[in-house]
Amino acid sequence: MRPLRFVTLGDSLTEGVGDPVGDSWRGWAALLAEGLAPVEAPAEFTNLSFSGAQTRDVLERQTPDALDLDPDVVSVVIGVNDTLRYTFDIHAVAARLDKVYAAFRAQGAVLLTACLPDPGSMLRLPGALARPLARRQRAVNAVVHALSERYGAVHLHAEGGDWITDRSMWSADRLHPGERGHRQLALRFHALLAEGGVATGSAPAAEPEFPPPTRSASLWWLATAGTGWVARRCTDLLPQLLTLAAAEVRHKARGTSARLDLSASHAVASALAALSVAEQPDMA
C-alpha cells in the first residue's frame, strides 16, 4: 500500500511564510503533514504553493501538477491576493475555485479549504481603506464556504476568533502567522481530519519550537522585505483602493453605507448562481 499523499496549493500562507526553519519556510501544511499518518509510515508531502499566488495561478499552474500526483488529501487555501488586485472579480474567483474543487473531488481526494481574515484589519488600515478590503474578503469567504459545502470539503473557519487578535500568533508583517499561528492552523485542521478518520498520526505540538523573532529583527524585516511586499501590492491596488475609499466616505456621509454591503452580497449570489449546477459532483 502506498503512503498517504498530501498536496497543498495556495499562496504565501501555505508556503509557510512567517515560520522560518533554517533558510526556508515550514508552515502549517508541513506541520500538518507530519500528523496525517503514523511515524512508521509517514505521508508523502508536496507543497505547490508560492508567494503572491491568486486563484488563477491555482487553477492554471498548481492544479495540473497536483492532479498528476494523485493526492489522497489536498488543501486549497487561496483568495487574499485576489482581494489585493485591481482586477478583483468575485465571479472569476468563484468560477476558478469551482473548477479546482470539482477536479480534486472527481479524483477522490479529501479536500481542505479555509476562510481567512481580511488583510485590511490585519494591517490596521484606516476604516475607509480597510472596509473595501474587508468586503472583498467576506465575498471570497462566502464563495469558499458555499463551494466547500457543495463539494463536501473539510472546511476550517479561520477568519475570526481569539487567534486573530492574539499578537503572539502573528509574524512581524501582521499578515502571516508566526510559528505559533501556523501551529494553530495545523492543529485545527488536524482535529477536523482526525474526527473524520483521515488523520491517524499525532497532532502537531501547540507550543513553538523556536523563539519568536526579536523586536529588532522584526523591525529590520519590515524595513526591508516588508516594505518591498507592501510596495509591490500598493503599486497595483492603491489607485483603485483610494477610489473605493472615497466611495466609502461619500456613502458614510449620506448614511447609505449599507448599499455597498448589499451590492457585494448580490455579487456573491450572482457569482454562485452563474456556476453550473446541472451536473452535481460525484461524492462517492
Image (cartoon, grey):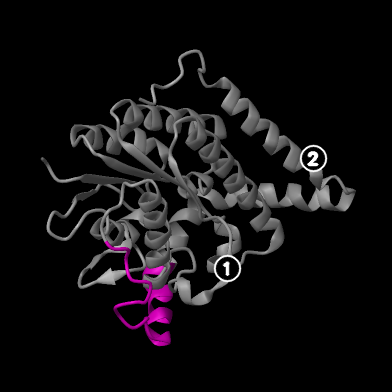
Q: Is residue 88 visible?
A: no
- Residue at (54%, 57%) from the top-left corner? 119
Question: Are the two marked residues, 2 and 1, in contact with CB atoms closer than 8 angstroms?
Answer: no
> Which disc, if any, is residue 162?
1
Q: Is residue 201 visible?
A: yes
Which quadrant is home to the C terminus? Answer: top left
Name the spot of residue 116 as percent of width and height, x first.
Answer: 51, 53
> Which disc, if any, is residue 176?
none
Is 60 rendered above or below residue 176? above
Name the spot of residue 29 as percent of width and height, x first.
Answer: 31, 56
Q: Who is closer to the viewer here, 213 or 183?
A: 183
Q: Which dot, 2 or 1, sits closer to the camera?
A: 1
Amino acid residing under circle 2? Arg
Ranked by sequence position, the earlier of labels 2 and 1 is 1
List the residue tagged with mark 2: 259
Magenta run includes residue 34:
no
Q: Who is closer to the viewer here, 128 or 58?
A: 58
Q: Please give left or right for residue 174 compared with residue 255 in the image.
A: left
- Residue at (85%, 45%) from the top-left corner? 256
Image quadrant where residue 113 sits? top left
Is 4 rendered above or below residue 201? above
Amino acid residing under circle 1? Asp
Q: Please give left or right for residue 103 compared with residue 5 in the image.
A: right
Is 17 rendered above or below residue 267? below
Q: Residues within 10 Å of mark 1 (few under 14, many from 20)?
A: few
What residue span does the magenta drawing correspond to?
A: 202-226
Q: Residues within 10 Å of mark 2 (few under 14, many from 20)?
A: few
Which quadrant is home to the N terminus? Answer: top left
Q: Secondary structure at mark 1?
A: helix
Residue at the limit of the structure toward the right, as seen here:
254
Name the spot of residue 104 as percent of width and height, x first.
Answer: 32, 31
